[in-house]
Image (cartoon, rainbow, N blue to C red):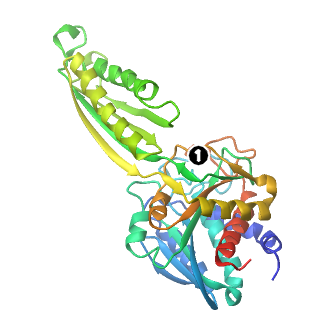
Amino acid sequence: MHSLAAETEPMADTLVAWRRDFHRHPELAFEERRTSATIRAFLETIGIEVRSCGGTGLRGVLSGARPGPTVALRADMDALPVAEIADHDYASANPGVMHACGHDGHMAILMGAAKLLARRRDALPGAVVFLFQPAEESPPGGARAMIEEGALDGVDRVFGLHLWQPLPTGIVGVRAGAMMAQADNFEVVIRGRGGHASQPNVTVDPVVAASQVVVAAQTIVSRFIDPLQPVVVSFTTIHGGRIHNIIPDEVRLTGTVRTLDAQTQVAVKQRLGEVCEAACRLYGATAEFTYIEGYPPVVNDPTSVDLVSRVAARELGAGSVRTVAPIMGGEDFAYYLQRVPGAFAALGMGTNRPHPHHSARFDIDEAALPLGVRLMAAVALEMLGAQ
């Protein structure tokens, strides 16, 4: 059998075609019907047993010729409700929906890895499970639904990767322990007493109270949390009022909290509620605070991180592996890692790609696709002891 590099090189144009097809036809969470059908048809043509899992998700199994461990590889499938701004010919054909995070590339990579591994079926000990997961972008997400329907049955370890714009193309970012953050949301409804803007003295102004809440909440990170502990508290929407000369009765705020450990998450949650209530009381308003827990932190198993690092250095070069700082984004890959050991890695694709994830101008460096195929296939082979 040829080396993975030699086998992957001729696949480069096919990987790009797959990725661009997914990019042209993005689908939102749990609506990935065309995407799922495309992937299913491909897996079946290379002799992989496939079944639906978690709604629009897929679980494919490649059984080797000999007994051995079982390793799972995962790719997410959903797009985002973003209207793409692009001048390339593979721009989204679905108005208001876009692959703005790299999931189109993740699917192409895992399909390529499946093709390479299927060629080795007769020499494989154990099995490889391919998880194509819906709804990563929309909590509560698709991972838990996949798990509930048996995605991890018999699996010994699970691995995933995320194409990552902040890293140069070909650099693999890994970290043992907390790799990505717990991603929670909150809403604050501030109620006062509206009236004419020329007579603020006879109103209870929820706009002023809301402004105080936003400012006061910044002290949670700067004054109440250990400065060595990564935390994010961000307000992202403010809605209230309809016209310039009326003070409204109500203002709604929403935002997100990102933490890396349970103790800090509980402390931020409690303090944020206290700040909202106290700041509003100062102005005679009331606050209704709702906190919605999102995905837990992605906590990588150190042994699995060592495996990924070793494989990446061998396949992509010794200088390709970096230990990265925790990423404060959230990922429902965390649920897989709560069930079985494994690792989630970042694969750089940011060379000459200035636009960040979730931007309407986001695009990937497609040179990363064959590198991702080699990495995922090699990780599976290493785990099975087939290298």
Q: Residue at x 31, y 42 (%)?
A: 291
The answer to whether residue 306 is left or right of residue 195 is right
Q: Which residue is mark 1?
A: 357
Q: Is residue 380 placed above or below 180 in the rendered structure?
A: below
| Res 55 seen here | no
Q: Name the image quarter holding residue 301.
A: bottom right
Report x, y in % for residue 126: 60, 84
Q: Name the image quarter holding residue 335.
A: bottom left
Which of 205/375 is in front?
Answer: 375
Report x, y in % for residue 181: 49, 47
Secondary structure under tag 1 reads loop
- In the rendered picture of this protein, how many numbered marks are placed on residues? 1
Q: Residues within 10 Å of mark 1 (few under 14, many from 20)?
A: some
Q: Is residue 177 placed above or below 243 in the rendered structure?
A: below
The answer to whether residue 336 is left or right of residue 343 is left
Q: Quadrant of the N terminus?
A: bottom right
Q: Quadrant of the C terminus?
A: bottom right
Q: Residue at x 58, y 65 (%)?
A: 159
Q: Is residue 327 placed above or below 212 in the rendered structure?
A: below
The amino acid type, in three-letter code, at marker 1 is: His
Report x, y in % for residue 348: 69, 51
Q: Residue at x 47, y 66 (%)?
A: 32
The answer to whether residue 110 is left or right of residue 178 is right
Which of 134/175 is in front?
Answer: 175
| Res 236 seen here | yes
Report x, y in % for residue 265: 39, 41
Which of 147/108 is in front?
Answer: 147
